Image (spheres, grey):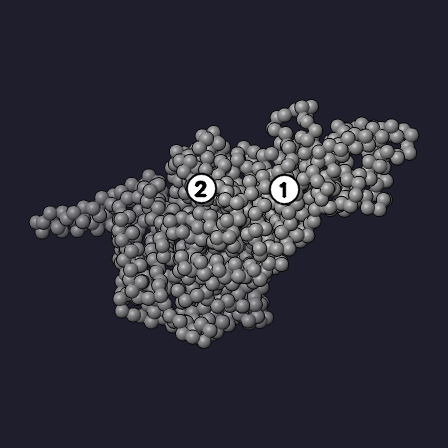
């Protein structure tokens, strides 16, 4: 059995029948959590897409089955930082945990479409007509006979496939037209088709031979998509031509450059043993690491479809993503235009009438089957006349695999019972297993009997909801929990978003006790540094004090920064202790102008600038030395003003917590190099939102001033080479101040360029509404307040339906609603896996044991 591919160039394949097909992924859209009207709108878009088909297409809905071994092996390849060895142990133990719960494999469905561009010889003729070159009559005669000779040799098998450069140029133009046409009529809601690369086409071609065995071997001759970057942005991928010498010989002839594919390289796509077994089963065998490994697969096809369809509620293709074992689907479509469709329907109507007439003449009643068929044809005729739909000649094949024949038999029975309830009849024909298997080969011919093909209108096929997907997370990072009825693992790599020109920042919102801090700490405070990043947690409640007790693995890299009115903390927030002088001067100016209520246009500001310029040239500059410089400024015009500023600063230096900024002694400053820094700011007294500045007491005024160096430290921390996460707990308190709001806004907006993220924890999404477009991931915890629920739905761009309102109300503790960076939405049941991690992250107050300190 051979995959019918003789050549691949970019996203175009050339088959052994000299047909050319273009390959794309249908980038899916979320379907759940929408109102009925929105789901019907999606259905209409799918109908429009199917109605626009002009040529044969093959659609594959494929579960990308991955082994947990492979996932975590890939994760371990990218480990870095001081905890790399510990991260490897964590990855291995998490892998074993998932295998014990779910088995060795997981899966995620993707949808692909192969669109027939035409036959190579047809394209050749079109190319000849477009070539603007004057030729002599003898030259035209010579090329005519050379072309015919070439065609005869190819048909007879005397020569291999030959593709001229000008033919490929024609294909390129033809593919571009097809791409633009179907992109405009895509099944997606606001997204698009994506061209596949050779590596992906290779995987799709090889996978039928590797079901249940493992990933097909990587074929080095097939290139991965090459990204083109312009002005720091990835531009739209294009069909490219640059033949690998190993996959084809390239020669120069009188007619130009010619590509001659190497057959031996493309035969490798079909490597593996396929054997027919009893019980409607195929046995697959591959050599893996020198050992023979086998699995079993079966193919089912649709033998009967329901008479009607309805949406929502009858999404018969969408359902396979919730089945507990991997199911793949191949759909072959040959569109027939409206006029030809009407002719076919009229002929069928006449055929049924003739059968009815013969039955009547024989003295028998008109059979119910004929009556049903006649009514179905009349209904089809009305659809064609009223809506001008084409007819789609469709066949649908389902693929199952398992490690044993007994399990495979159970899967078949289970799948058939599921579709019985949907009024679809699935059969597993023993004599057609090899033919049905070939339906999963790109570019293959349809080989099933007519009994298993159907004339469907676009709405009938659209009711299955092609393109709709159930996804959550990025499938590349560490494990954070489970989602869906199948308890699918959710993986997340926070550092991936900036690499894809997306925001890595996130929000965690909801009522008290829902698990906001727990999840933010798990992702940003534990897993990120463990796997090579850095974390800064600004802690206003002292909830992370117990981390040193539980996280022994972080010893030496876990830094607590307390802000007490005690000598060991004096000078900790002096910006000259942790920033370069130029940046420290800027922060110092902001602090003094705030404390002294100085405006930029005031003369005092001129005195401050003069003093900070002199401070730059001092050894070991500090905020306290700034006071001394202000007092000794020798400019007669500024001296009085500078002394006034100095007195103001000395007054604040004597106030509670003033020495955190102004300290005449060695600075005990914050360190930037630790992997995890917890900045405990629970002694700050930030003013309540809306309180007038004139009503601030001394501690509130100082607390706001301290936000300037805290903000500067957070930004400096984020400028590390490693991926960094800043966690802002109780963010609403910080955002009431100008400096705090600046911190949140700046980190959210610049995170992509800084390879950083900020995780904002707040009770209300209203605090973050202005920043929602710059938040890559959102976690919503339970809320019972109806106004807040409405805000949540607007925050997620979901409709205010009763179903969505009830969903938010019924969110369980520790199982928030997640919207990932691609906009997919679903519930994630958070799982820290390890008990000591769970205990460290718990913030729920518990009773103290006898003997515990009060």
Which callout, 2 or 1, points to the residue nearer the camera? 1
Residue at coordinates 35% horizontally, 65% vertically from top-left? 403
- At a point 59% along the width and 53% down the height, the residue shown is 529
Q: In the image shown, does 149 or 206 lie closer to the viewer?
A: 206
Looking at the image, residue 684 sits to the left or right of residue 370; the answer is right
Label 2 sits on a secondary structure element that is: loop
* Quadrant in which the N terminus is drawn: bottom left
Residue 221 lies, in percent from the top left, at 54, 68
Residue 328 falls in image quadrant: bottom left
Is residue 178 or residue 772 the one in the foreground?
772
Horizontal and vertical percent position of residue 605 = 81, 31
Q: Is residue 507 visible?
A: no
Kindly report the distance in space between the C-alpha atoms of the residues bearing marks 2 and 1: 26 Å
How many discs mark residues in the rendered view? Answer: 2
Residue under label 2, please give it. 813
Of the two numbered discs 2 and 1 on the same chain, state the one appearing first in sequence.
Answer: 1
């Amino acid at each position: 059995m051979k995959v019918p591919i003789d050549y691949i160039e970019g996203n175009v394949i050339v088959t052994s029948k000299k047909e050319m097909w273009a390959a794309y992924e249908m980038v899916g859209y979320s379907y759940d959590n929408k109102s009925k009207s929105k789901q019907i709108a999606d259905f209409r878009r799918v109908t429009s897409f199917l109605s626009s088909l002009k040529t044969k297409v093959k659609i594959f809905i494929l579960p990308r089955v991955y082994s947990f071994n492979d996932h975590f092996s890939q994760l371990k390849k990218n480990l870095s930082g001081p905890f790399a060895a510990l991260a490897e142990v964590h990855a291995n133990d998490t892998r074993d945990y998932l295998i014990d719960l779910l088995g060795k494999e997981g899966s995620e469905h993707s949808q692909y479409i192969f669109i027939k561009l035409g036959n190579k010889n047809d394209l050749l003729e079109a190319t000849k007509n477009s070539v603007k070159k004057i030729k002599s009559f003898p030259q035209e005669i010579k090329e005519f006979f050379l072309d015919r000779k070439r065609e005869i040799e190819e048909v007879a098998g005397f020569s291999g496939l030959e593709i001229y450069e000008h033919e490929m140029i024609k294909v390129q133009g033809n593919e571009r037209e097809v791409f633009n046409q179907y992109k405009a009529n895509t099944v997606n809601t606001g997204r698009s088709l994506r061209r596949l690369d050779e590596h992906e086409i290779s995987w799709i071609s090889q996978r039928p031979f590797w079901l249940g065995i493992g990933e097909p071997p990587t074929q080095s001759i097939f290139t991965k998509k090459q990204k083109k970057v312009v002005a720091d942005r990835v531009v739209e991928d294009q069909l490219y031509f640059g033949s690998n010498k190993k996959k084809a010989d390239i020669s120069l002839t009188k007619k130009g450059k010619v590509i001659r594919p190497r057959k031996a390289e493309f035969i490798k796509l079909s490597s593996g043993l396929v054997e027919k077994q009893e019980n409607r089963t195929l046995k697959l065998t591959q050599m893996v690491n020198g050992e023979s490994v086998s699995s079993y697969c079966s193919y089912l096809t649709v033998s009967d479809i329901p008479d009607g369809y309805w949406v929502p509620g009858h999404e018969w293709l969408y359902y396979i993503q919730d089945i507990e074992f991997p199911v793949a689907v191949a759909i072959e479509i040959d569109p027939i235009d409206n006029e030809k469709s009407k002719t076919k329907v009229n002929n069928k109507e006449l055929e049924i009438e003739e059968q009815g007439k013969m039955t009547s003449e024989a003295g028998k009643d008109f059979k119910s089957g004929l009556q049903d068929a006649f009514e179905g044809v009349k209904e089809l005729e009305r659809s064609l006349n009223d809506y001008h739909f084409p007819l789609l000649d469709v066949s649908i094949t389902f693929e199952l695999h398992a490690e044993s024949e007994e399990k495979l038999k159970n899967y078949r029975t289970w799948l058939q019972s599921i579709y019985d309830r949907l009024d679809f009849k699935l059969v597993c024909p023993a004599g057609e297993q090899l033919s049905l298997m070939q339906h999963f080969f790109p570019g293959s011919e349809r080989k099933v009997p007519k009994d298993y093909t159907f004339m469907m209108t676009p709405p009938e096929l659209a009711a299955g909801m092609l393109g709709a997907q159930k996804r959550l997370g990025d499938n590349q990072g560490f494990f954070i929990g489970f989602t869906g009825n199948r308890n699918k693992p959710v993986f997340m790599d926070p550092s991936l978003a900036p690499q894809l020109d997306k925001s890595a920042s996130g929000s965690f919102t909801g009522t008290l006790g829902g698990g906001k801090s727990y999840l933010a700490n798990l992702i940003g405070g534990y897993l990120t540094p463990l796997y090579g990043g850095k974390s800064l947690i600004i802690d206003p409640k002292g909830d992370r004090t117990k981390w040193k007790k539980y996280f022994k693995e972080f010893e030496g890299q876990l830094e607590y920064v307390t802000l007490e009115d005690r000598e060991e903390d004096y000078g900790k927030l002096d910006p000259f202790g942790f920033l370069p002088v130029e940046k420290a001067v800027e922060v110092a100016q902001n602090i003094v102008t705030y404390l002294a209520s100085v405006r930029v246009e005031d003369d005092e500001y001129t005195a401050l600038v003069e003093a900070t310029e002199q401070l730059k040239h001092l050894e070991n500059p500090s905020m306290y030395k700034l006071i001394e410089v202000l007092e000794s400024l020798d400019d007669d015009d500024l001296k009085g003003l500078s002394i006034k500023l100095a007195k103001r600063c000395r007054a604040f230096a004597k106030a509670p917590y003033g020495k955190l900024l102004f300290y005449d002694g060695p600075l005990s400053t914050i360190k930037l190099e630790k992997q995890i820094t917890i900045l405990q700011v629970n002694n700050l007294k930030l003013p309540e939102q809306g309180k007038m500045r004139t009503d601030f007491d001394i501690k509130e005024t100082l607390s706001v001033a301290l936000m300037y160096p805290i903000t500067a430290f957070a930004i400096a921390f984020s400028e590390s080479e490693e991926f960094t996460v800043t966690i802002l707990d109780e963010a609403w308190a910080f955002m009431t101040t100008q400096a705090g709001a600046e911190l949140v806004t700046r980190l959210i907006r610049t995170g992509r360029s800084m390879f950083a993220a900020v995780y904002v924890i707040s009770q209300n999404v209203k605090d973050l509404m202005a920043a929602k477009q710059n938040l890559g991931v959102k976690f919503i915890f339970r809320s019972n307040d109806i106004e807040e629920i409405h805000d949540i739905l607007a925050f997620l761009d979901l409709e205010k339906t009763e179903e969505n309102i009830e969903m938010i109300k019924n969110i369980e503790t520790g199982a928030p609603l997640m919207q990932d960076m691609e906009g997919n939405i679903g519930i994630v049941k958070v799982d820290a896996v390890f008990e000591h991690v769970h205990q460290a992250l718990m913030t729920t107050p518990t009773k103290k044991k006898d003997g515990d300190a009060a």
